[in-house]
Amino acid sequence: MTTAVAEPTGSYRAQFEEMPPAALRRLQERRLRSQLAYVWDRSPFYRQKFTTAGITSKDVRTIEDLAKLPFTTKDELRASQLAEPPLGAHAAASMDDVVRVHASSGTTGRPSYIGVTKHDAATWAESVARAYYSQGVRPNSILALGFGIGFFVGGVAVQAACEAIGATVVPVGVGASDRLVSAFDDLGADQLTCTPSYARYLAEFVRTKLGRDPRELGVKRIFLGAEPGGGVPAVRAQLEELWGARVSESIGNGDVLPVYAGDCEERTGAHFQAPDLVIVEVIDPDTGRALSLEEPEIHGELVFTHIDRECVPLVRFRSADLAVVRTEPCPCGRTGPRLRIIGRTDDLLIVRGVNVWPSAVRDVITSLRPLTTGEFEILLRSPPPLIDGPLSLRVELGDGAPDDVDAIGRRVTEELRDRLIVAAEVEMVPPESLPRFEMKARLIRKLYEEG
Ligand SMILES: [Zn+2]
């Protein structure tokens, strides 16, 4: 898989964003055939999967043929990685060719790892650059980067992308709000990229800790990402009011591309901007049937097939992201469908930009027996997946626990932080005090439904 990646020119309005449909389809189908042949040769996971389904890579020639292929789920990737560490049997490149490994918190206590070759890193930067360019990053921009660089797949890629555009990047990350403010005061940064919850937190910090109006900081544009809130009109309106800045969003998925869609100036949904790297399908999440992209508005789950990926190419990957997809023409001229993520098909929670599966929390709590009984409940004060603030938990003390209840609570908090990278607020409760369920453990309690 070696396709040329454009040299940086400052303009990241790619030809693929405006390509006539017929030409784009030819390009996608050519790359699809070549990617599937590559996957067949190099990924034991996929060879097995295709063989079980009774097909070979050669049976798929067109985009319609994709329907012959089985879906790939996150659970399968996790199992594949546990069985064949470090990257899994689905990986198609050796560690020698991998230049970077990202870790994201997985559905169990073990992080899931995503490898990137030199070519993958270049395509990541390219697709992120398109989305940041369409939102207004230019060579004369000074961008304060308020994403966690470490565990968030997008952090490094956003930095690389904005540098490629020629903008000045000030990588600050999260947890250093003072330094972020200095980037505006001392360096004249005029743009900010971070999660919606951090943008809100930072405004609050500036007001209460510094006694200043966030509007004085001179932030002109805020690019939201890594959490779904950036597409919600009320969230945007609130942030625009707080900051006096124009707010837009980009969308990505750690297993697919850190960013594959971004708002244009019209802000009527993030344009899908990576049709040369990945094919997107929209399916009915209940039946798995692919929905036609000819309709003006489609609701469904996004499914992705890489067509230019070396390390971990995925075939019909069910993202579990539920989206509204709009296809009517946009005045900006970009032809890619516009997406808004409206929820998840699974029980994923997103705590300040970090993915947390309740099953992973259970693994951590259970591993702390006999300090705990293993029983706990996650308290949600608003509908998931987005959790603003620390994850709130009630955890049962175990019978074998020593008397210092506060110390046990701290231990649970630390384990959650170390193993899942999540900030938690833990209340220890007596043994046998949480409700038991006969059929299936209920890990989440929706306080907002209890009135
Ligand atoms: Zn547009």
Image (cartoon, rainbow, N blue to C red):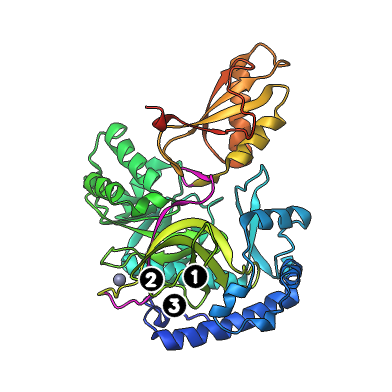
Name the N-terminal-most of marks 1 and 3. 3
* Residue span colored magenta: 332-353
Name the side, left or right, on which 234 lies relative to 272: left
Give percent across and percent down for residue 399. 71, 15
The disc placed on residue 337 is 2
Q: Badge 3: how crowded within 10 Å, few (<14), some, or many (20+)?
A: some
- Residue 336: within the magenta? yes
Q: CA distance from mark 1 to mark 2?
A: 10 Å
The reply to whether discs 1 and 3 touch (Cβ–Cβ < 8 Å) is no
Mark 1 CB in 8 Å range of ligand 1? no
Name the side, left or right, on which 190 lies relative to 443: left
Give percent across and percent down for residue 244. 21, 50
Quadrant of the image for the N terminus? Answer: bottom right
- Residue type, mark 2 in image: Pro
Compared to residue 28, the image places residue 116 above or below, namely above
- Residue type, mark 1 in image: Val
Q: Which residue lies under the disc numbered 1? A: 280
Q: Nearer the viewer, mark 1 or mark 3?
A: 1
Q: Which residue lies under the disc numbered 3? A: 8
Compared to residue 250, the image places residue 347 above or below, namely above
Q: Is residue 307 visible?
A: no
